[in-house]
Image (tube, rainbow, N blue to C red):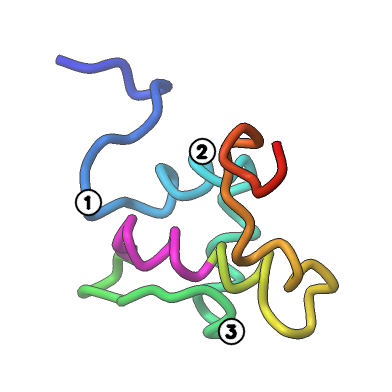
Amino acid sequence: MSDSRSAPEHEILTLEEVAHYLRLKPQTIYKWAQEKRIPAAKIGKEWRFRRSVLDRWLDEQMFGDESGFEHLRDEPADPSRREGA
């Protein structure tokens, strides 16, 4: 059995797992889900999140046209792979 404090490894995440993953308070994730500020699905009384969708959403938040960091979108993560390096 895995430690509940470790990073979640499932594709479908609970609200608490998302809070841990994004290093935010569960109350923030709950509020954002209700306000449709973060991609989520309410199943019964519980919120669920898909890790791959959250990763895409986070990339859009970080590198979207209004982020101020859109110039970093196409840069390779490994500095040794940049042109002229």
Amino acid type assigned to the residue bearing label 3 in the image:
Glu
Work out how far the residue at label 2 is from the one at label 1, CA to CA, in angstroms: 14 Å
Q: Residue tagged by mark 1?
A: 11
Residue 83 % position (x, y): 66, 49
The quadrant in which the N terminus is found is top left
Q: Residue tagged by mark 3?
A: 35
| Corner quadrant of residue 75 | bottom right
Is 5 positioned to the left or the right of 49 in the image? right
Residue lying furthest right in this view?
Answer: 68
Q: Residue tagged by mark 2?
A: 20
In contact (CB < 8 Å): disc 2 and disc 1: no
Please tell me which residue is depicted at 22% across the width and 17% down the height of the picture.
2
* Relative vertical location of residue 6 with respect to residue 45 in this rendering, above or below: above
Could you say whether the residue bearing mark 3 is in a helix, strand or loop?
Answer: loop
* Relative vertical location of residue 5 with respect to residue 18 in this rendering, above or below: above
- Magenta span contains residue 23: no
Amino acid type assigned to the residue bearing label 1 in the image:
Glu
Could you say whether the residue bearing mark 1 is in a helix, strand or loop?
Answer: loop
Q: Earlier in the sequence, mark 2 or mark 1?
A: 1
* Along the line of sight, the residue nearer the viewer: 70 or 48: 70
Could you say whether the residue bearing mark 2 is in a helix, strand or loop?
Answer: helix
Please tell me which residue is depicted at 40% across the width and 43% down the height of the picture.
17
Residue 51 % position (x, y): 33, 55
Please tell me which residue is depicted at 22% across the width and 73% down the height of the picture.
43
Residues drawn in magenta: 48-57
Work out how far the residue at label 2 is from the one at label 3, CA to CA, in angstroms: 20 Å
* Along the line of sight, the residue nearer the viewer: 3 or 83: 83
Residue lying furthest front in this view?
Answer: 84
Nearest to viewer (mark 2 / mark 3): 2
Residue 30 % position (x, y): 53, 65
